[in-house]
Structures are given as C-alpha cells and as structure tokens.
Image (spheres, helix red, strand yellow):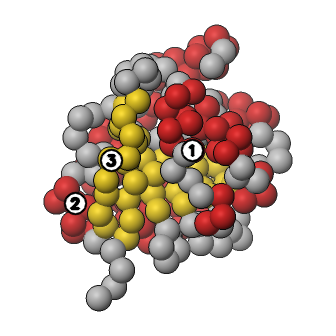
Amino acid sequence: MNHAQNVQFLSAWFRNPRQAGALLPSGSSLAQAMAAQVDPGRGLVVELGVGTGAITRALIARGVREDQLILVEKDPALFGEMEGRFPGVVALRGDAAHLGRLLNQAGVGCPGTLVSSLPLLSMTRRQRLRVLIQIFSSLGVGGVLVQFTYSPLPPIPEVLAAALGVSGRRVARVFSNLPPAAVWVYQVHSPR
Ligand SMILES: C[S@@+](CC[C@H](N)C(=O)[O-])C[C@H]1O[C@@H](n2cnc3c(N)ncnc32)[C@H](O)[C@@H]1O
C-alpha cells in the first residue's frame, strides 16, 4: 500500500470515521486472505466498500476477471479514485443499503460472491440490518458473503445471523494486519 493511498484513506476517516471503519486501508495479507475465499468459477463477484482497492487488486490477482467484478463504494472521493484505478471494472457509487437497486440499475445479475469490507459493527443496528437484508437477498443460490472484522466477535451477531437464515464460520485470522483481523464466510441456509 502506498503513501498516497494511506493519506486518501485517512482523509476518508476524517470525513466520516464510522463509515471508514478504520484508520488504514486493508493490508496485503488481509486482502489475500479475503481473495483466497473467492472461487472465480462461481460467477459474478461484487465488492462492497472498496476504499483504496487493496482487496480489488488481490481479487484480480486471484483470477477474478475484470468483466466479472462489480465495485461498490459510498464515499465520493474514494469512489473517484477507485474509478480511475480500475477503468475496466464496473464501478457503482452508492450505499450498500440500496444494493438491490444499484445492481438492477446497472443491469447486473445475481452475484455468486459478495466480498465486503463494510464496517458492519460500526453501523447502527438499523443500518446494519438494512445492509444485511440487501446483501443476502442479492446473493444467488449457493452464494457466499466474505467479510472481515477487526473484532474478536463475529461480524454478524449470531442471533442476527440466525434470524437472517445464514450461517458463518471464521476461516482465517490475519495477525499481521494493522489492526489484526479475521475473515468470515457466510452462506444462506438451503430451504428445507
Ligand atoms: C474498512 S474500509 C475499506 C478498506 C478497503 N478494503 C481498503 O483497503 O481500502 C470500509 C469502506 O467501506 C465504505 N463504506 C462504508 N459504508 C458503506 C456503505 N453503506 N456502502 C458502501 N460503502 C461503504 C467506506 O467508505 C470505506 O471505503
């Protein structure tokens, strides 16, 4: 991660600390641990909360093609930088709480994987619920959500995950990231 990108991210934190969710962008080991959970053969990949694009680069290095990747970012300045950084990728500026509408307007089908850096635990409960309902209703059958957290607790509280009909497991811990992080994968339960 270069100095200019750290400064851009820090500026986003000053504009809105809760929305940025961290002082620094994701480190490369965290980005690789997130990308390792993505099967490029599982169709469309939507990345939520792209920030400086650390995870985007790891997804492309993992073999996700630019034409199967959709980027979503809410912060206008980070969005502008991101568009310039990944000109071959569809980039949508907006709130993940309106994910269904954003994808529909862009004529994008059902993602097989959502990769999220959204600071779920910094959101109000109401905002988090809106975002999670959008996430799990946008995913196709068998789709997965890959999410990281800086908390020792799950990024989606267990009671809420059960209410949403999803189950999650921690798949990696990245102690070298600043701050240390854990990667979780969530799947929608099959209907009985
Ligand atoms: C922890 S940072 C992302 C770090 C990113 N992986 C990087 O390396 O820069 C969280 C990102 O999510 C974005 N974000 C927060 N809430 C959002 C929302 N509701 N919809 C879309 N993006 C959001 C923030 O603007 C920020 O870029």
Residue 136 placement: quadrant:
bottom left
Q: Work out whether residue 167 or residue 161 is closer to the camera in this orientation and state it.
A: 167
State left or right for residue 128 relative to residue 62: left
Q: Residue at x 31, y 37 (%)?
A: 122
Image height of 137 relative to 9, above or below = below
| Location of residue 12 in the rendering, given as x and y in whole percent from the top left corner | 52, 25
Q: Residue furthest bottom?
A: 192
Q: Secondary structure at mark 1?
A: helix
Look at label 2 and name its amino acid: Leu
What residue sits right under mark 2 in the picture?
160
Look at label 3 and name its amino acid: Arg
The CB of the residue at mark 3 lies under 8 Å from ligand 1: no
| Location of residue 185 in the rendering, given as x and y in whole percent from the top left corner | 40, 54
The CB of the residue at mark 2 lies under 8 Å from ligand 1: no
State left or right for residue 71 relative to residue 21: right
- Precedes in sequence: disc 3 or disc 2: 2
- Precedes in sequence: disc 1 or disc 3: 1
What residue sits right under mark 3 in the picture?
170
Image height of 96 relative to 138, above or below = above
Q: In which quadrant is the C terminus drawn?
A: bottom left
Query: Dot 2: few (<14), some (14–19), or many (≥20) neighbours within 10 Å?
Result: few
What residue sits right under mark 1 in the picture?
35
Residue 191 placement: quadrant:
bottom left
Let me know if residue 111 appears in the view. Answer: yes
Q: Residue at x 72, y 59 (%)?
A: 68
